[in-house]
Image: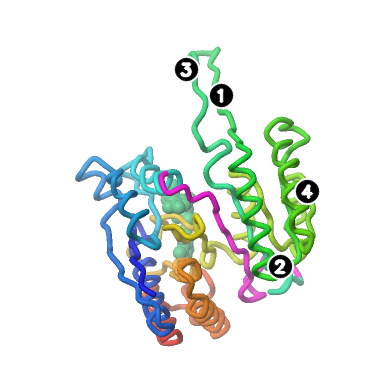
Amino acid sequence: MHHKVAVIGGDGIGPEVTEQAHRVSAAAAQRAGLELEYTVFPYGADYYLEHGVGIEPQRFDEFRDQYGAILFGAVGDARVPDMAHGREILLGARFKLDLYINLRPIKLFAPELCPLKDKGASEVDMVIFRENTEGLYVGVGGQVRKGSADEIATQTAVYTRKGTERIIRAAFNYARQNKRRSVCMTDKANAMRQGHELWQRTFREVAAEFTDIEHFHLYVDVAAMEMVRAPERFDVIVTENLFGDILSDLGAGLQGGLGTAASGNIHPNRCSLFEPVHGSAPDLVGTGQANPMAAVLSAAMMLNHLGCSPAAERIEQAVVDQIVAGETTPDLGGNLSCSEVGDRLLARVG
Ligand SMILES: NC(=O)c1ccc[n+]([C@@H]2O[C@H](COP(=O)([O-])OP(=O)(O)OC[C@H]3O[C@@H](n4cnc5c(N)ncnc54)[C@H](O)[C@@H]3O)[C@@H](O)[C@H]2O)c1
């Protein structure tokens, strides 16, 4: 198997952590017999300030037609306060490559990382399927009488049958393929009676096709409480864009913070983008303290997407072993630098 991979480090700690993800994933892929050809692209705030564009729009055509995946770091730089370049790159990829699944595994790698009392790896182990192309993020709305006392702002959520059905179906398919027991759909249909009624109805219809998978529904406020009170209730969660954004950060908290929180922006069998959940962390730039594990675990998700699950599993196991051995950056209690963590992961994987 041969795939092209685009590497975009972005801003702040993005390039540092992505470099480690690049070399660890290359070693794991090589060992598993997967041929990956990486191309590094310079997109980020520097590129935007120099060229006036975050990314050339035609680049997405190239990614879609020629690349298997994009390995992404983070964007965010004080010199671009409106984040114009970040939106072009990240929202551009989500919409132009139609990456409708935002996949966020919530997995506790060591019990001491969890802020909850008496919860271990078997209790905190769920996967969130966040719809990634609709809801409030499509940008429908406007402002009237801006700056006056009578100002009005509207932001309209958009839900389509097609968009709702495909993410719910993806969650059930994932549950079946990965031997997960249940799928929970969470919404706010009691208050958002139009859009979320569509979600409820679609969920019931799709669930009826997957009789081997349990399914249940929770309103999002209850789901947030239950994730903290009894995370073991959850296996696969499927939800709309904004709620998925919020719940997956709650999940990152349960697994011990941003240092190990990985994500994929996915269209099955097409070029997809993999990135750590964290941002560009300007406070860590130049300190060597950025934890590369979230980026490395995102690269493992990429290898899974490219059909090489043994390489992905090898990376995950290396991360677990390394956390247990205390060979981590300071955010996880260790005293290694970003590149030293990368070196040791490389040794474990290779
Ligand atoms: N997907 C993205 O590219 C993305 C996501 C979130 C934020 N951002 C942007 O990043 C910039 C900074 O945002 P922020 O400070 O709110 O969020 P952040 O995720 O960059 O940082 C939040 C906190 O977590 C710590 N942290 C983050 N990543 C870490 C890592 N790998 N290892 C150890 N500690 C880590 C930081 O030091 C900071 O204290 C902003 O411009 C924001 O818009 C980008």
Residue type, numbered disc 1: Thr
Q: Which residue is mark 1?
A: 154
Span colored in magenta: 96-117
Q: Is residue 10 above or below residue 293?
A: above
Of 302 and 248, the residue lying toward us: 302
For disc 2, the neighbor class at 10 Å (few under 14, some 14 to 19, many from 20) is some
Q: Are marks 2 and 3 in contact (CB under 8 Å)?
A: no
Q: Secondary structure at mark 4?
A: strand
Which quadrant of the figure has residue 273?
Answer: bottom left
The mark nearer the N terminus, 1 or 3, is 3
Q: Is residue 195 left or right of residue 28?
A: right
Residue type, numbered disc 4: Leu
Q: Which label was assigned to residue 61?
A: none
Residue type, numbered disc 2: Arg
Which quadrant of the figure has residue 34?
Answer: bottom left
Q: Are marks 2 and 1 in contact (CB under 8 Å)?
A: no
The mark nearer the N terminus, 2 or 1, is 1
Q: Which label was assigned to residue 180?
A: 2
Q: Are marks 4 and 3 in contact (CB under 8 Å)?
A: no
* Colour setup of the view: rainbow
Of 347 and 130, the residue lying toward us: 130
Q: Residue 297's x, y, as percent?
A: 49, 70
Q: Residue 190's x, y, as percent?
A: 78, 35
Q: Which label was assigned to residue 146?
A: 3
Q: Which residue is mark 4?
A: 218
